Amino acid sequence: MSSYQPPSASGSPRFCNMGNFMRLPKAENAKGLDFAIVGIPFDTAASFRAGARFGPNGIRNISAMIKPNNVAMGVNIMDELKGADLGDVPVIPDYIHETYTAIEEVLTGVLNEGAVPISFGGDHAVTLGELRAVHKKHGKVALVHFDSHLDLCDTVFGQKYNHGTPFRRAMEEGLIDPSHSIQIGMRGSLYDPDDFKIAAELGFKVIPGDELHKMTPEELAEEIIKRVGDMKVFLTFDIDFIDPAYAPGTGTPEVGGFTSYEALQYIRNIKDLSFVGFDVVEVAPPYDHSEITAYMAANLAFEFMSILAYQKKKK
Ligand code: MN
Ligand code: MN
C-alpha cells in the first residue's frame, strides 16, 4: 500500500493541520525557533456556542494578510525571530483530560527548545493545559488575562473542567500567582452579582470593562506592570474581550466591549514584560462575518510576536 494515505479521521480530527500561520514554514518541532505557532482546536468545554475547533485554521487562513513589518513597534519580526507553525495539538473532542495531556506534551516540547509558544484555541479551557506546561518550565507565573469573563467558576454544569473554570483550576494547581495576576475587561450580565468580589477574595485583581473604558492604554499598562512586578507572564486573550461589533465570531459574546484599535494599544503598551507564552482563544469561525474576528486574533498574535522581536532587538 502506498504510504501517501491521508490520516484517518478516527485518529486525527479532520479539522487539524490545514495551513500555516502567516505562511511561515511548517515544522515538526521547535528546535532552533524563537516562537512556535500551535493550534488547539478543542471546543467541547464551551458552554453556549461551539465552533472554536475551527479557530486555529480560521486564524491561519486570514493571517496570509499580515506582513512582517510592525511599523508602530519599529520592528520587522522576521528579521529578528525564527518561527514556524507546528500544526495542531492532537485534541480529542469531548475528552478534556486526554486533550490536556496532549496540550501539555506539545507545549513542553516547545518550551524545552527555548521557544515561546503562541497558541490558538479552541475554547478557553485549553489554557489550563498550556499553563501546566509553562509551570513545569518556568514555575509559577503571573497571568495577564483579557476577557469579558473571569473564567473563575468552581464548576459549570457541575463539572470542574469547562471554559468557565480554567483560572480557578490554575490557581488551585499552583500554576499562577493570583497576587501578581490581573483580569481585564469583564462585563455583561451575571448570575451572581458578587463575581468580582469572589475574584478579589481569591486574590485576583480585576479591571472591569466599565473601569477600563475610562482609562488610557498607558494607565492600563501602568496597572498591569505594577501588578506583575518581576514575575514571568503568560498572556491569555479571549477574543470576546473585543466588542462583538469587531469580533462577532465567538461563543459567548458580550456587548459594551473594546475596539480593535484599543486592543492593539493595550498590548503594545506592555511590551517590556517577561512573556513566556501567549494564546488567543474562543474564535468561532462559524459565527464570524468577513473573517473579521479571525483577523483580529491573527493581528493580536502578530502584536505579541512584535513584542518578542522588539525585546530581541533591544538586547
Ligand atoms: Mn474566557
Ligand atoms: Mn470570555
Image (tube, rainbow, N blue to C red):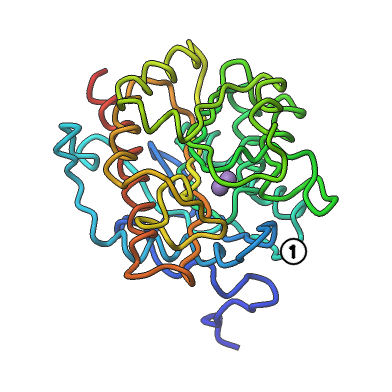
Quarter occupied by the C terminus: top left
Residue 190 x %, y %: 65, 44
**Which of the image's four quarters has the N terminus?**
bottom right
Q: Residue at x 30, y 26 (%)?
A: 216
Q: Is residue 164 left or right of residue 68?
A: right
**Disc 1 marks which residue?**
94
Near-viewer residue (134 or 216): 216
Q: Secondary structure at mark 1?
A: loop
Label 1 Cα neighbours within 10 Å, binned few <14 / some 14-19 / many ≥20? few
Residue shown at 17%/35% (left/top)? 72
Q: Is residue 144 left or right of residue 91?
A: left
Q: Is residue 219 visible?
A: yes
- Give x and y (percent) for residue 24: 32, 55
The relative height of residue 16 versus residue 143 in the rendered view (above or below) is below
- Occupied quadrant, residue 149: top right
* Quadrant in the rendering for residue 197: top right
Q: What's under tag 1, amino acid-wise?
A: Asp
Q: Quadrant of residue 194?
A: top right
Image location (x, y in percent) of residue 5? 55, 82
Query: In which quadrant of this rendering is ligand 1 seen?
Result: top right
**Can you say whether 12 is above or below 112 in the image?**
below
Number of marks drawn: 1
Q: Is residue 100 left or right of residue 5?
A: right
